């Protein structure tokens, strides 16, 4: 079972950096979430659940059975929204035995 706390701490750090870069955190943009899975079937199951939650998802096979997952959604990146997204994606990834690897999004100057 993974630990979500480092990801939530990273959200605070990322928010601070975005404010310093004058990012308009209240403007929606494509936000990408990444996860790794030991089994492709688990990645596909997580993808179905994320799609039902409104994410566009790509699963890519790595080696014979492993897979990486990329889930995207248009969203703002203020701290409350970032935390809610991380909590949602992290929980889905964990349910399917994956390892959540964080998120990224472009900076939109204000």
Image (cartoon, rainbow, N blue to C red):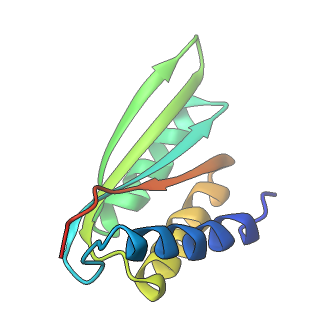
Q: Determine whether, in the image, residue 48 is placed left or right of residue 24.
A: right
Q: Residue at x 30, y 55 (%)?
A: 72
As drawn, 61 above or below 31:
above
Between 105 and 50, the residue placed more toward the observer is 105
Residue 61, percent from left and from top? 47, 21
Q: Determine whether, in the image, residue 95 is placed left or right of residue 23.
A: right
Q: Determine whether, in the image, residue 84 is placed left or right of residue 70.
A: right
As drawn, 55 above or below 18:
above
Between 24 and 7, the residue placed more toward the observer is 24
Quarter of the image where one finds residue 60: top left
Between 76 and 22, the residue placed more toward the observer is 22
Residue 20, percent from left and from top? 41, 72
Residue 84, percent from left and from top? 49, 81
Q: Residue at x 67, y 31 (%)?
A: 38
Q: Quadrant of the C terminus?
A: bottom left
Q: Quadrant of the N terminus?
A: bottom right
Total of numbered circles in the picture? 0
Q: Residue at x 19, y 68 (%)?
A: 109
Quarter of the image where one finds residue 2: bottom right
């Amino acid at each position: 079972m993974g630990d979500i706390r480092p990801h939530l701490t990273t959200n605070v750090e990322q928010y601070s950096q975005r404010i310093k870069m004058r990012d308009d955190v209240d403007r929606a943009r494509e936000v990408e979430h990444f996860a790794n899975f030991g089994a492709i079937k688990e990645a596909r199951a997580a993808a179905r659940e994320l799609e039902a939650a409104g994410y566009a998802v790509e699963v890519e096979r790595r080696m014979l059975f492993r897979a990486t997952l990329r889930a995207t959604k248009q969203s703002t990146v203020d701290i409350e929204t970032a935390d809610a997204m991380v909590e949602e994606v992290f929980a889905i990834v964990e349910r399917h035995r994956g390892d959540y690897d964080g998120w990224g999004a472009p900076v939109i100057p204000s």
